[in-house]
Image (cartoon, grey):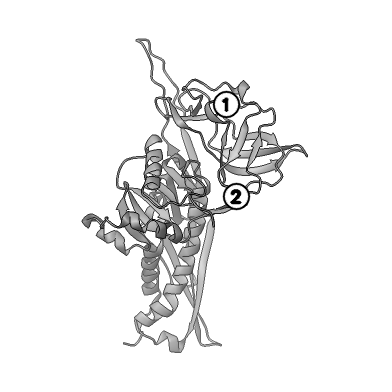
Amino acid sequence: MGNTNLTVDWIGNEALALAHEKAAFIGTINRQFDSTMEPGYGNQIRIRVPSQYTVRTGRVMNVQDGIQQSTQLVVGTTWGVDLRYNSQEISQDLVSFRKLHLEPAMANLISNLDAACISSGTQQTYNQVGTPGVPISTLQFPGLARGRLNQYLAPKDANRRLQFDSVTMSEMVNAFATFQNPSNQISDQYKEGFITRTSMADFYENERVWRMSASADVSSFMSTYTLVEGDTDIVVYAVNAAPTIGQTFTIGLGAAGVFACHPETKQAYTHLQQFTLTGVSTVDGTQTTFQFQPAIRLSGARKNVCGSTGADLVVSSLTTAVVRFDGGPSTTYPIPLMYHRDAFTFATAALPLMDDSIRCVVKTMDGISLRVWEGSDIRNDEKLTRIDILWGFAAIRPQWACRLIGTGV
């Protein structure tokens, strides 16, 4: 069949379908906020996070002010992919055009988007399970990650996912041997990388999983520094090699460490609170400042750290505590990620249609908006096509996600 139906509208529909199919990570996270983005109204979305409260003991009221928390999602990054093809190629049938031009173009665009988002989401996730150097080869490790999501009150519903790199997935093959795809998950098999559902999560194989390169120096001590409410940085003795942004670390050792606690009851968990590194700066030749998240909350409704018994931290006893990063020195680890859909948000905005172009369309499906714009090159007998996406990504509830660490590469 001649390619009489190769229109900008058809290209837009096909490009959007390919984007939806190939978005192994983006396609599994929250995208409901894109509808609030309209051209001309700025590029930020304010996402509200529920307030936290403490429980009163006794008859007398203890009225608390609701502390409204929010995060900003900036939709300000435009990425695109550009195609050109001549009259002879235009005359091809639609199937050939899709295979030779559209599929490789969209695979490249979505692969880069997926990689950028899963890398950012993993680096902003501070909970981590597994033992560096021990292979993730059984369902024990996804089970530990599931437990960590439960501890931080992620909804126990069908919206949990786990992204594995292909090497780790190959180590998990025997663990999946007895599992079959549930009948109500058949449609998910058409999403790129979908494997199965078990351990309360959909499992995906995604080679764009973030790889964490541990620094050559993975341990230090706080430099006579006292933790305070709301801290997002600490001062440590100078490190010989700066750690990698996104590495996770703990403060203190054993019973003298900084423990995590239940978000509501404030009872101590058995693990130390983990933090993810967001920045490093050198104060002078003897001290280094680590920036991190989450912020340290020592008391009140937002309390997230405590002593081993659940009591408030005695910060005066931690001024020279050990700061230890996860992972062996100078080792690279693929970091699989388990998460609830609402831990992360991906948003797109509809790009404007250009007035001087009769071949410009905007297509939207399932929270992903693309613009396709065509023009011609009369000198070279070619048609030029650009496919653009204006997007943003944010980790709005990173406590609803958990990283896994195993063997290095």
| 356 and 138: which is toward the camera | 138
Q: Residues within 10 Å of mark 1 (few under 14, many from 20)?
A: few
- Residue 127 in sight here: yes
- The residue carrying mark 2 is 214
Q: Residue at 25% across / 60% down in the picture? A: 186
Indicate the position of residue 97 as horizontal and vertical percent values.
Answer: 40, 80
Which quadrant is home to the N terminus?
bottom left
- What SS does tag 2 mark? loop
Q: Which of 180 and 134 is in front in this view?
A: 134
Q: What label does residue 229 carry, if any?
A: 1
The C terminus: image quadrant: bottom right
Q: Quadrant of residue 226?
A: top right
Kind of residue indicated by mark 2: Ala
> How many labels were placed on the picture?
2
Whether residue 185 sits left or right of residue 400 in the image: it is left
Amino acid marked by disc 1: Glu
Looking at the image, can residue 42 be seen? no
Rendering quarter of residue 238: top right
Judged left or right of residue 256, residue 368 is: left
Residue at 45% over, 60% down: 167
